[in-house]
Amino acid sequence: MSSRENILGRIRASLHRVDGDGATARVHAHIGAHGMSARPSVVGDLTAGFREKALALSTSIDEVVNIQSVPAAVAAYLSANALPMNAVCWQALGVLDWASHGVTMAARPARESDKVGVTEVFCAIAETGTLMTLSGAHTPPVTSLLPETHIAVLRVSQIVPSMEEAWQRLRETPDYPPRAVNFISGPSRTADIEQTLTFGAHGPYRVHVILVNS
Amino acid sequence: MQLTSHQFKARSREKLADANLQGALKKLQGNFVKGRADRVAELENFPAIRDAAAAIRARTLDHLDLYLEEFERNATARGAVVHWAETTADVNRIVCELAAKYDVKKVVKSKSMVSEECALNDALEAAGVQVVETDLGEYILQLAKEAPSHIVAPVVHKSKDQVSDLFAEKHNLPRKTGIPELCKEAREQLRPHFASADMGISGANFIIAETGSTLIVTNEGNGRMCTTLPRVHVAITGIEKVVPTLEDIATLMRLLPRHGTGQTITNYISVTTGAKRQDDTDGPEHFHIILLDGGRTKLLGGEMQDMLRCIRCGACMNHCPVYQSVGGHAYGWVYPGPMGSILTPTYVGLENALDLPNASTLCNQCGVVCPVKIPLPDLMRKLREKQFAQGLKPRTETWGLALWRWTAQRPRIYAMLTQIAARVLAVMGSSDKLIHNLPFGGGWTQGRDLPAPQGKTFRELYKSARLSETQKLG
């Protein structure tokens, strides 16, 4: 008997599982129903809710009118914080006009030496101020992880009330489920030494969201 | 991890006298206890969410075999390899075999309490593989060759100065004194390891039957590194961690960070499903998931089953007056506090951890704060009953109780003895009418005084009250 059979056998014996009692069908039906449990109501404007919660997580936020305005906002953020004007970004953002705003942008996955990574997001959660990103050929997770500064471009239409809606949206994607779903709630942090909160443990020191209104 | 739970009393005495530790434990109460209360107050329907979380965990356990099979089917379909381990030794064997198969020289680890159960690092090092813990707390412990003392804040027992000394010695760099500087130094030491490691090992806070995914909750980002950069990812977890759906994760994520660290949400929640896809530029080429029994099936179907609902938040220990006084190391195994006082005896044997089910005042703070409503004091009481039934209680205790039972069944003798005892104790009281050192009860009076009996005994008062009652009626 394999370990698998031994373990499952012990579980079945402990639970007095009887074959053909319909439990398997019930379990499949339960999973398939994707039932929601009690949750807090997220009331009011989603964008305002997201903004308030994200700021509380030490994420900073800027707002622009359309996607073409993103490079200027990125340039302004980098220079205001005395950060390098070299950055890497996800492929879809590579088409924007970075050069005329003084940003040297490379549309490739981040490497160890890159200081600034710019990504889009899959969606964002108003309840907690969280960004949700999916891995993929053109959306490498390393870009939001390795650089000291992560800038995320978020469209207002991507903000959902809670994680439940985020999962529903995910199920509708063509490559569902992706290899990695990363929920990001502010800059990397630790409080391991004397429970003193410190930013930039292993991941980014700064997370900056550029909210695109259209 | 080596088991030293039988030394609980001796270790507790040591820890009570450790000023450094006592200071650290006070801070823990301030941050985690207040943090939890504040974050829970944010949820207007918290009781309903808590009920739902407990129901999700209970339901899954009632169908554990079926959800595990569903998890395995979906994980395998997405390119992960699922292994089943009956014992912690099996986990170590499987990981070492994988390390050999993929020619692994270096492993980076994100925090995993199950790997502590297995003493996995020792097994890998014995097999010639370098292991680097990358959670800051676990990294400090690895350098100091110590065990974690808390399941969420593993290095809570160490002061900043101790970390400064340790880093200066081990890194061979000028001694830093600021916490941000110490964190930065650890970041710079650990960064090169992520890129050069061949294998990343993580735990899993949950595994999801619907998708065959593993999920980790972290703040530092090391968990993301370990599951993204090395070419092999191995996730190790207990069989009880399965939940049915992604919606269930949404519910549990409202409670785990709030109860664990007093956060609304942790910085990163990472859900990984299968290995790197064909066109992906990052992610591991091989993804293995090890499911450990390690004593868990023994709890199923019996009076201890509720314990398997545990989501490892640590709230029970943060709120426990015993943990708050002695810290985690006194408990002598991987899991301290009330949850550890149940898990240690049930996983490693009741006879090996006699003090633990008794290391509780049964005040029920742990039961009140448990996010999945585990009746922790009831379970500790059941373990005490088992100890008694199996004759594992110390002889002085069983004889003492037998003697008391004998006298309690004989009212005349009982009355006589208590009258004598009351008189003797009254005489023993010092000028302040307190007994500072009780014979046969020295342990009890070590930390407090016993007020010496004053005036008449209850029986005498009762008798005279009844007498005057009859006179009145007459």
Image: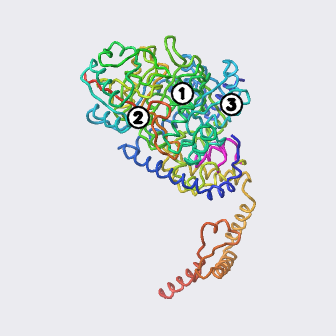
Which-is-in-front pick, marks 2 and 3?
3
Residue A59 position in % (x across, y down): 37, 34
Residue B192, placed above or below residue B368: above
Quadrant of the image containing the N terminus of chain A: top right
Answer few, some or many: residues within 10 Å of disc 1's Cα (few below 14, many 20 plus, some between 14 and 19): some
Q: In this orientation, does residue B63 appear?
A: no
For the magenta stretch, what is the residue range? B330-350
Residue identified by numbered label 1: A23
Host chain of mark 3: B
Host chain of mark 2: A
Labelled disc at residue B86: 3
Labelled disc at residue A37: 2
Residue B77 position in % (x across, y down): 55, 16
A196 and B86: which is toward the camera: A196
Answer few, some or many: residues within 10 Å of disc 2's Cα (few below 14, many 20 plus, some between 14 and 19): some
Q: List the single residue furthest toward the front.
A: B174
Instruction: Examine the residues drawn in magenta and state their main secondary structure.
Output: helix
Which-is-in-front pick, marks 1 and 2?
2
B83 and B306: which is toward the camera: B83
Residue in the picture at 41% in, 28% down: A149
* Amino acid marked by disc 2: Ser
